[in-house]
Image (spheres, rainbow, N blue to C red):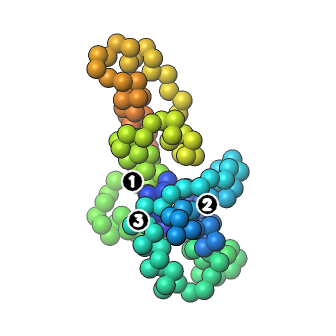
Amino acid sequence: LIFLLMLRCGLRVSEVSRLRWEDLDLAEGTVRVNNGKGQVDRLLYLSPDVTETLRAWSARRPAADWLFPSSGPPAPTIATRTIYRIMLRYLAEAGVSAHYSPHSLRHTFATQLLNAGVTLEVLKESGATLVPTLTVTDVWSNLPGRTPDQVERQAVLSRLHRRAAERAIAM
């Protein structure tokens, strides 16, 4: 569920680890992120599969304020480092040798939105600070049949993939 929320909502590791049940509105299909990066609050939509998984999780969970409580003191919530270790374990069990981190799910979220035709302006406003400011006027003006959004979307995808490859090589 942790990784599903990160993938479908674009949540950061720190954001998903601090979610409270009161932040969710399953009837409306939304999750409120309070004090995200830069002390920004935002409201995100839950996909139907996330909503159903959350309903199932709430029926089986122990009573707690936090969506992912800690197994003990000192912290009340699951540690971000624990989330990272869980992901590494899942990757190993799946036989995936490439380096991925929980943050990779955030990049995948942004890539999926861009591929679905979401404009960069909408993506930026959603709080997904993965998208850098791009200047593509000179590029798209010389490409027949391509809109500025198409060229800009491709540029972002290329940057995301290049950064992921650079990180994999550096590791």
Q: Amino acid at mark 2?
A: Arg
Query: In this view of the protein, can residue 56 be seen by the observer?
Result: yes
142 on left or right of 43: left
Question: Which of pointers 1 and 2 lies earlier in the amino acid sequence?
Answer: 2
Give the residue at x 57% y 41%: 125
Q: Are marks 1 and 2 in contact (CB under 8 Å)?
A: no
Classify mark 3: residues with Cα within 10 Å, few (<14), some (14-19) or many (20+): few
**Residue 106 rendering spot, x and y as whole percentages:** 47, 51
* Mark 2 lies on residue: 32
From the viewer's perspective, is residue 72 above or below residue 8? below
**171 or 54: nearer the viewer:** 54
Distance of label 2 from label 3 (alpha carbons): 16 Å
Give the residue at x 68% y 74%: 75
Classify mark 2: residues with Cα within 10 Å, few (<14), some (14-19) or many (20+): some
27 on left or right of 142: right
> Looking at the rendering, which quadrant does residue 113 occupy?
top left
From the viewer's perspective, is residue 23 above or below residue 9? below
* Mark 3 lies on residue: 48
> Looking at the rendering, which quadrant does residue 1 occupy?
bottom left
Query: In this view of the protein, can residue 77 be seen by the observer?
Result: no
Q: Amino acid at mark 3?
A: Pro
Distance of label 1 from label 2 (alpha carbons): 30 Å
* Mark 1 lies on residue: 99
Closest to the camera, between mark 1 and mark 2, is: 2
From the viewer's perspective, is residue 17 above or below residue 60? above
**Residue 83 rendering spot, x and y as whole percentages:** 51, 66
**Residue 89 rendering spot, x and y as whole percentages:** 40, 69
137 on left or right of 91: right
Is disc 2 placed on a helix, strand or loop?
A: strand
Give the residue at x 49% y 53%: 10
